Image: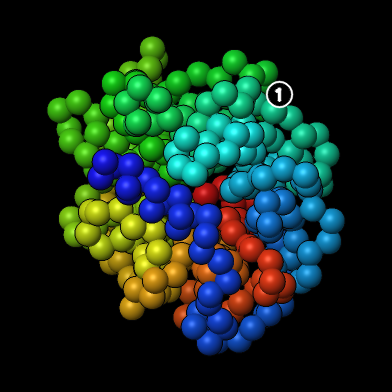
Amino acid sequence: MKKVDTLACMATALLAITGVLSADDGGKSANQSTSFRGSYYVNGEIHVNTYGQPEGKPLTTGHQDFKPSWSKTGDMLVFFRKVKNDPDVSKWKTAIHIIHADGTGLHQLTDGTHTDFNQTWTRDGNNTPIWNRKNPKTGGYVVMASKVGAKPGEEVPLTDKGHSTWAYTCLTDGRILVRSNPPGQGMGYYLMTPGKNVHPTFERIECELAKTGVLARVSLSSNETRVCFEFQRGFQRRVPGRALYVADFDAKSRKITNAKPFANEDGKPIWFAYPRWSKDESSIVYHAGGKLYLYKLEDGSTHKVSTDDKADYRYPHFEGAPK
């Protein structure tokens, strides 16, 4: 019963928290124009736009499309489409899709009979779309992979169904940053190297902050020396009230250090989420209370970059910068 209550709370947080944040709460100035292009969700539609400018025609319409991630090559987005609703988000049925950033070439990768979430791209030159698929028997997740142009049913698992693994972001050397509980190693954050016959290797990441709470929706900078993420203090799941952090990352020693909050440090009960790096690593974009904000690392300033306060903005990314 406790698990069901937790999932229901998560669903409520994901679906019901909208425009309750003002510019005074989250940004030092409103509707700041920028030179950055990105992809994001507005009221269930995918948009590509310059942050701070009014939206034009959406890339997708007539559906509920979520979490567009922009390929490193700069020409494609991967997102999931909700095809069957449920009050419990973890019971949604979804289909992974790819579309060109100019709105052409929409292509479905999965058949819509699974719960497929939080897709991204590899950075190893293969441009492989990966995502997390729920195992309905255990409630855990399996990391899946496919190819651009593939058909539904051609996707393959990268991890074993016997334990849960959730993929966040990818490295150029082919490793994937995950949260997992591989047999004999315990729950934690790992750099996972995919292996043959669904036998990946897991190398644990050291992070002092992770001893006091949960790192979620981790995004890796282009040069792979920094990460940004949501941080939930404590281990009882809650979505509103998380702070957003930036930290140093060492892929060789597998350490996350020098973590510092940059948004919602005081834990306002608002949905701050999905921080993502710009390609030049100067900025981080995120959503909060149904609006989009851009944080500049050089001077620590934050500006609102969504333009319609009556719309629900979520899941921003920068051009050519997969999470």
Depth order, front residue of 156/113: 113
- Please name the amino acid that badge 1 sits on: Gly
Q: Is residue 174 visible?
A: no
Callout 1 secondary element: loop
Which residue lies most toward the left here? 184
Task: Report the residue at 57% width, 23% height from top.
Answer: 113
Q: Residue 230: percent from the left, percent from the top? A: 39, 60
- In the shown orientation, is residue 219 left or right of residue 310? left
- 161 left or right of 233 in image: right
Q: Residues within 10 Å of mark 1 (few under 14, many from 20)?
A: few
Residue, x 49% and y 44% (percent of image)? 87
How many numbered discs sit on the rendered protein? 1
In terms of depth relative to the viewer, which is nearer, 313 or 304? 313
Q: Which residue is mark 1?
A: 149
Placement of 160 over or under 315, stated as above or below: above
- The residue positioned 39% from the left and 71% from the top of the image is 269
Percent position (x, y) of residue 76? Answer: 70, 41
Quadrant of the rendered image containing residue 157:
top left
Quadrant in which residue 193 is drawn: top left
- Residue closer to the observer: 133 or 221: 133
Q: Quadrant of the image for the N terminus?
A: top left
Vertical arrangement, residue 149 with respect to residue 38, above or below:
above
Q: What residue is rendered at 71% in x and 61% in y?
A: 37
| Up-down relation of residue 60 to residue 34 (above or below) | above
- Furthest toward the top, the residue is 197
User: Residue 226 location in percent, x, y?
Assistant: 40, 59
Question: Residue 53 at what x, y percent from top left?
Answer: 76, 71
Q: Is residue 189 left or right of residue 99?
A: left
Q: Is residue 112 visible?
A: yes
